[in-house]
């Protein structure tokens, strides 16, 4: 449904690249998340797909038709792409119904379609209200309805939940993507929150420094990350340096990088690799306790445990099956 080949974009005539030689394809009807730290190229990528930027090299195909390359540039309004922005971008002087009608003014049955999408997002009874009369979550659903009204073949959501508090965020995330799945539209959403990506995406694309470093299903990204960077995006990860390998007495391959997830470090002496540590600070986190510890070689680590009775001196360890291995 979407095919991208060798896509690159620079904003300073090739001195640095916001996006460099990116290639991938997307299946119709699936939900994809784009994840990466600030400056990784997420926004540049979706702006190129939407037709808001022109590539320096490579091309983009939508439904088998080339829409972006050095030689060809199809305008954004002709790409049949729906956009949902984090600021919602609703017209404050228009009712919910009129906000949606604005984008489908050329449709024959525009009022029926507007009513249909408002019902889809559960706001049909509020059609005559104005944006300022809605909560943030309701405004987000209106923005989604407006984007879906023209029946796009591709829906792009840019940080759709970043303006919401954590409790509302989780609830709305599930509601929004249930709606998207019902429509069958292919969706791409950009997020800084990996929990959003893990919860709803069929596949996740990881960008680092303008390059696509891994594209995989959520479970594989967690259990089989291809780099320490990818591993660190999906939970607290400790890189096993030579010093840590020595103190835990765990000789690992010298031609690889290794890491262990924080949750796989246990407070007991029955693990394969163990060492001793002094507890410097305890922080209560509800079901868990966060410990700042000092190993006997002087290194400091932060670990999470469910143990309640933590003494000043503890034994910690991990098992070989939990060690992540990367060739970098």
Image: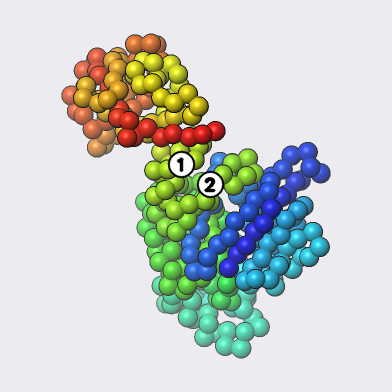
Instruction: Give the residue at x 73% y 63%.
Output: 68
- Extreme top residue here? 297
Residue 243 seen in render: yes
Q: Quadrant of residue 259?
A: top left
Q: Quick one: 302 or 89, which is closer to the camera?
A: 302
Image quadrant holding the N terminus, namely bottom right
C-alpha distance separating marks 1 and 2:
8 Å
Q: Quadrant of residue 211?
A: top right
Residue 259 tag number: none
Instruction: Give the residue at x 48% y 29%.
Output: 257
Residue that numbered label 2 is attached to: 214
Residue that numbered label 1 is attached to: 225
Image position, residue 89 (x, y; %): 60, 62
Q: Is residue 216 left or right of residue 83?
A: left
Are there few (<14), some (14-19), or many (20+) residues within 10 Å of tag 1? Answer: many
Instruction: Give the residue at x 49% y 81%.
Output: 115
Which secondary structure, mark 1?
Answer: loop
Are there few (<14), some (14-19), or many (20+) residues within 10 Å of tag 2? Answer: some
């Amino acid at each position: 449904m979407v095919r991208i080949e060798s896509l690159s974009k620079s904003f300073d005539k090739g001195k640095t690249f916001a996006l460099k030689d990116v290639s991938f394809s997307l299946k119709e009807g699936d939900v994809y998340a784009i994840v990466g730290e600030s400056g990784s190229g997420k926004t540049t990528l979706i702006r190129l797909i939407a037709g808001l930027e022109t590539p320096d090299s490579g091309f983009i195909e939508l439904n088998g038709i080339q829409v972006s390359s050095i030689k060809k540039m199809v305008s954004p309004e002709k790409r049949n792409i729906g956009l949902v922005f984090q600021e919602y971008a609703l017209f404050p002087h228009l009712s919910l119904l009129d906000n949606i009608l604005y984008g489908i003014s050329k449709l024959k049955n525009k009022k029926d379609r507007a009513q249909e999408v408002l019902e889809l997002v559960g706001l049909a009874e509020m059609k005559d209200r104005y944006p300022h009369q809605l909560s943030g979550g309701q405004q987000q659903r209106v923005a989604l309805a407006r984007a879906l009204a023209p029946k796009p073949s591709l829906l792009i959501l840019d940080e759709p939940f970043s303006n919401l508090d954590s409790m509302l965020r989780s609830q709305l995330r599930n509601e929004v993507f249930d709606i998207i799945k019902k429509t069958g539209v292919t969706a791409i959403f950009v997020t800084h929150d990996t929990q959003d990506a893990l919860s709803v995406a069929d596949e996740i694309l990881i960008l680092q420094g303008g390059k696509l470093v891994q594209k995989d299903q959520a479970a594989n990204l967690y259990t089989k990350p291809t780099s320490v960077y990818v591993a660190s995006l999906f939970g607290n990860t400790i890189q096993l340096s030579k010093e840590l390998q020595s103190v835990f007495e765990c000789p690992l391959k010298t031609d690889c990088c290794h890491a262990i997830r924080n949750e796989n470090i246990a407070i007991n002496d029955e693990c394969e690799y163990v060492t001793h540590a002094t507890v410097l600070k305890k922080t209560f986190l509800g079901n868990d306790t966060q410990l700042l510890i000092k190993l006997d070689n002087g290194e400091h680590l932060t670990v999470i445990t469910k143990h309640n009775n933590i003494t000043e001196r503890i034994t910690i360890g991990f098992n070989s099956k939990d060690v992540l291995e990367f060739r970098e």
